Structure formats: structure tokens, C-alpha cells
Image (cartoon, grey):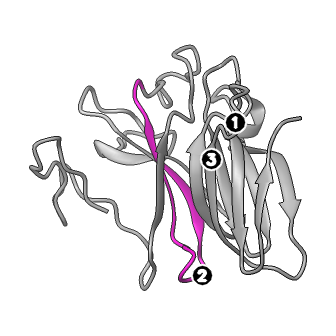
Amino acid sequence: LHLFDASGAPITFTNDPISPSFKGEQNHIWSIAVGNVDGIASNSWLPYFPNNPGKEIILTHSSPYRTVANNKLIILRYNNGNPIPKPSPPETYLFPFDTICTFKINGWVAGVNDIDGDPKGKDEIVLVDGNKVKILRLRDYETFEFRTGKPFDTLFVKEFPNETILKAEIVDLDGDSFNDLIITTNNYTYFVGKP
């Protein structure tokens, strides 16, 4: 995965020891979304997890077109400031374009947006796994769960038996200021919203 600036000039380079592109698994097709999943500035665990001031890149190795056995949900950020130390091993640092966290998961990322109006400013991640749609939220960096390798909290799961989800979109359809889900399967299109 390569990163470019607004003028189209590359920021990351394949096999560059200082600012490399992000390397994924072999034989896969990315599913990618962008959003602010770590929320407000107070969500930080210094020095290892400073709050990323912009949006993060959310991706999986699986997509609607190909399932990958070693699939992960990956949160990336770009930081061109001071190097950020890794929690382990000691005296190692993240690359400028590197992960906030990775988590083994089934499915592909369909979208990222604020679904519940979270006061901490976090966008939620919508994942599709066959006939299930899941909504996940990145936990706060300082929480025990995040520090022990469980970075995501599952907020919602909806299953569509005997169907395959082909697409999911996030939009406020009814004008109530809350985003809704439009889910298209091989048989139907569903509208999932807040009553």
C-alpha cells in the first residue's frame, strides 16, 4: 500500500529503509476506508500511542472479491514528526507510515463513519463477514483491553441467514442526524437505522 501527498508525489517507497510502503499478505485485494477511529486528543497512551490528529486508514486483506485466510483488520496512520517508540522490542521505532494496531478477523471493511454520535469523536468500523455485518469501535489506548491485545469492541452484529452481503453503505437516509446502514445482499436491500 503506497501513500502519496495531495500533489500526487509519493511519500512512501517500496523497500525504503526510512519511509517504506506498507506490505500486506500475498495474493490479496485490499478493502480500505478512512475515518477518525481514535477520536479526541485525550485518547492517548504516551509515548507508544499518541493520538493521531487526523484520520486513520482502516483496511483488511480480504475484500468482497477474495477471502484471505490470514486476514487482519489493520489501523494505519502517517506521522512525519518525532519517531514513535514501539512497546516492544526496546529501542525500536515505528516507520512514518505504520500500524496503530492489527487484529486477526474474518470479513472486509465496508465503511467507516460515526454511527452512534460517540462523545469521544470516534468513527465506527463496519465489517462484512459473509452474511453478517458487524460494527466495531477502537477502544481507548489506555484501557486494559487495548493494552492486552483486544483493541476493538463489538457494538452491533446483524445476520442475514441464507444470503451473502455484497455491499454496505453508511448515510443518514431519514434526516434524523444519525447515520444509517444500507445493506445489499444477493437477494434484497435492507435499511438499518435508529428508531
Number of the label disc, if any, that sits on residue 115 = 1
Lower position in the chain sequence, tag 3 or tag 1: 1
Residue linked to disc 2: 67
Query: Is 175 left, or right, of 33 in this rendering?
Result: right
What amino acid is found at the position of numbered circle 2 in the picture? Thr
* Residue 155 versus residue 191 in the image, above or below: above
Lower position in the chain sequence, tag 1 or tag 2: 2
Q: Predominant secondary structure in magenta? A: loop
What amino acid is found at the position of numbered circle 1 in the picture? Ile
Identify the element where label 2 is drawn.
Answer: loop
Identify the element where label 3 is drawn.
Answer: strand
- Residue 58 is inside the magenta segment: yes
Alpha carbons under labels 2 and 3: distance apart? 23 Å
CB atoms of marks 2 and 3 within 8 Å: no
* Residue 114 versus residue 164 in the image, above or below: above
Identify the element where label 1 is drawn.
Answer: loop
Residue linked to disc 3: 170
Residue in the foreground of this view, choosing between 23 and 163: 163
